Amino acid sequence: RVPDDKDPLSTVAPYACQRRTSITHHNAQITDALDILAKAAAFQGSEVRSLAFTRAASVLKSLPYKLQSVEEAKNLVWCGGHCQAVIQEILEDGVCHEAEALMTSEQYRCMELLTGIYGVGVRTAERWYKEGVRNLSDLENPNIKLNSDQKAGLAHYTDLNQPVTREDAERVEHMVKDTLYRFVPDLKITMTGGFLRGKQQGHDVDFLITHPDEEALSGLLKKAVDWINRQGLLLYHTMKARSHVHAYKRSTHMDGHETCYAIFALPHPDTSNSESEVPGGDLTAPAARAWRAVRVDLVVAPYNEYPFALLGWTGSKHFERELRRFSWNEKKLSLNSHGLYDMEKNCSIPATSEEEIFSLLGLQYVPPPYRNA
Ligand code: 8DG
Ligand code: MN
Ligand code: MN
């Protein structure tokens, strides 16, 4: 069926980066179920099926009204038969039995538990599941080898699975800025990720750091991390050095920016004093401690790559994926967190703001609060 201008449904564009998607929307019950189906498919290693559910959920998150019948969904992009069945079931019964069954299945429960450990991805979790791991205590088995990320993730499991509130994030921001400005007072520091999109809570706090003078950035992360460590507030970190990323690496969200993936001990607001001791793990009951563990990502980008890094680190992950897919499929341009490349002319296209990048792609600017695809 050919969409026409009067059809409100025809306004749903096929790429998430062509749509506005707020945090709150009108079809949460349906998208919650689709998000579970997407996650379960990913847990089963079916990336393609997972993406299909994610796309359907994303379309419904951008709808400006509540779906009243499954008929209305038949005109929507990415809402195929399976998605329509989910919609119908929820509209009729108020629940999606498939999602309910998946969520209570042992595999889903274990995969959720294990991928909740910092440093554990789907593949590792799946291997452990096949080896019989069902609980965190099963990881004490000497046959299970944990890398250092995973050991830290396990040591701080409870705290890291406790949502980071906006108040927490603001206190982390204070700590990060206070530290970084000691070394370079006129740095540009932006909190990115979910909090920039207006989320009230997140799983970590992301920061992007830049300065027009490249010299000001050199060695900065190491100095900052050393300082935080001397305050007794660094629980764990790994540094990723700056690396060259090829323009054709557009299919991944990994980039070559210098990055510190850290776990900070964030002192509680009322108890923060320089004497608060930071032990090695979070085995003490959270209430008895004067701090909580928080995951923090610190990213350093050269000034000319800053708009691309900002666009790349603001998310959501699905919005990013769709931006790259749109750039490549519709414009034959390769977009990543370093720049925009014309592969045919073999040249990079500079930009000084996010607005300019959208405009170069022929897209309407989408402000961060509408990137919750
Ligand atoms: P949350 O933490 O509140 O749960 O949500 P989020 O802030 O949206 O998720 P995130 O996992 O912190 O990721 C934020 C954005 O950063 C997301 O769009 C993906 C992107 N991102 C990573 N790792 C990397 C990376 O190594 N390189 C690049 N370019 N982007 C990355 O998460
Ligand atoms: Mn984040
Ligand atoms: Mn992050």
Image (spheres, rainbow, N blue to C red):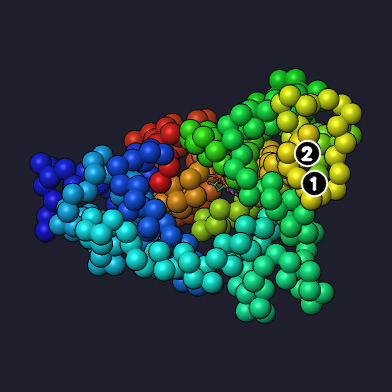
Please indicate whether residue 337 sits to the left or right of residue 146 in the image: left
Please indicate whether residue 39 sits to the left or right of residue 211 in the image: left
Quarter of the rendering containing residue 84: bottom left
Quarter of the rendering containing residue 228: top right
> Which residue is label 1 attached to?
284
Expressed as whole percent of the image width and height from the top left, the position of residue 283 reads 79, 50
Expressed as whole percent of the image width and height from the top left, the position of residue 7 reads 12, 45
- C-alpha separation, residue under disc 2 versus residue under disc 1: 7 Å
Between 35 and 268, the one nearer to me in the picture:
268
Q: Residue at x 70, y 41 (%)?
A: 294
- Looking at the rendered structure, the kind of residue marked 1 is Thr
Quarter of the rendering containing residue 56: bottom left
Q: Which mark is residue 288?
A: 2
SS at badge 1 = loop
**Circles 2 and 1 in contact, beta carbons < 8 Å:** yes
Q: Residue at x 54, y 72 (%)?
A: 107
- Looking at the rendered structure, the kind of residue marked 2 is Ala
